[in-house]
Image (cartoon, rainbow, N blue to C red):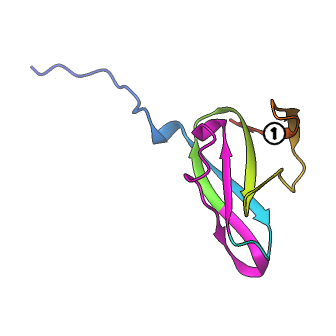
Amino acid sequence: MPREKAYKPKSGNQLKKETVFEFYAPLAQKVAVAGTFNDWDIAQYLLKKGAEGRWSLKIELKPGRYEYRYLVDGSWQNDQRPAVCVPNAFGTWNCVIEVS
């Protein structure tokens, strides 16, 4: 008689949550988001420009607390939406997102 294997949930994407990043910059040429979720890699997550200058991107993130900022045409910017911010080592502020 075959033995039944104990059910184990799959790890990976199953635990991740779709998180939307948006930035309004109608005159911008390039907008990226970077943070502790990607070791501040400014090339990994480029937002796409939509109608009326709203840039957006959906990223799958594991539950946790992340700091982030937007890079708009080479200039670091904080989220335009209300966000918790914490000081960083450069004398500016990082935004904080909690993914549950």
Residue, disc 1? 94
Image x and y of residue 26, in percent:
79, 76
Q: Is residue 29 above or below residue 2?
A: below
Is residue 51 left or right of 83 when viewed as pictured?
left
Is residue 27 left or right of 5 when viewed as pictured?
right
Which residue occupies 31% across, 20% down?
6
The range drawn in magenta is 30-56
Quadrant containing the C terminus in the rendered view: top right
Task: Name the one closer to the observer, 85 or 100.
Answer: 85
Q: Examine the image and state in which quarter residue 38 appears.
A: top right
**Is residue 40 covered in magenta?**
yes
Task: Tell me the element at label 1.
Answer: strand
Q: Residues within 10 Å of mark 1 (few under 14, many from 20)?
A: many
Image x and y of residue 33, in percent:
68, 52
Amino acid under disc 1: Asn
Q: Examine the image and state in which quarter residue 31 appears.
A: bottom right
Which residue occupies 71% across, 55% down?
21
Quadrant containing the N terminus in the rendered view: top left
Image x and y of residue 20, in percent:
68, 55
Image x and y of residue 74, in percent:
73, 58
Q: Is residue 64 above or below residue 54?
A: above
Which residue occupies 77% across, 62% down?
23
Q: Is residue 75 above or below residue 90?
A: below
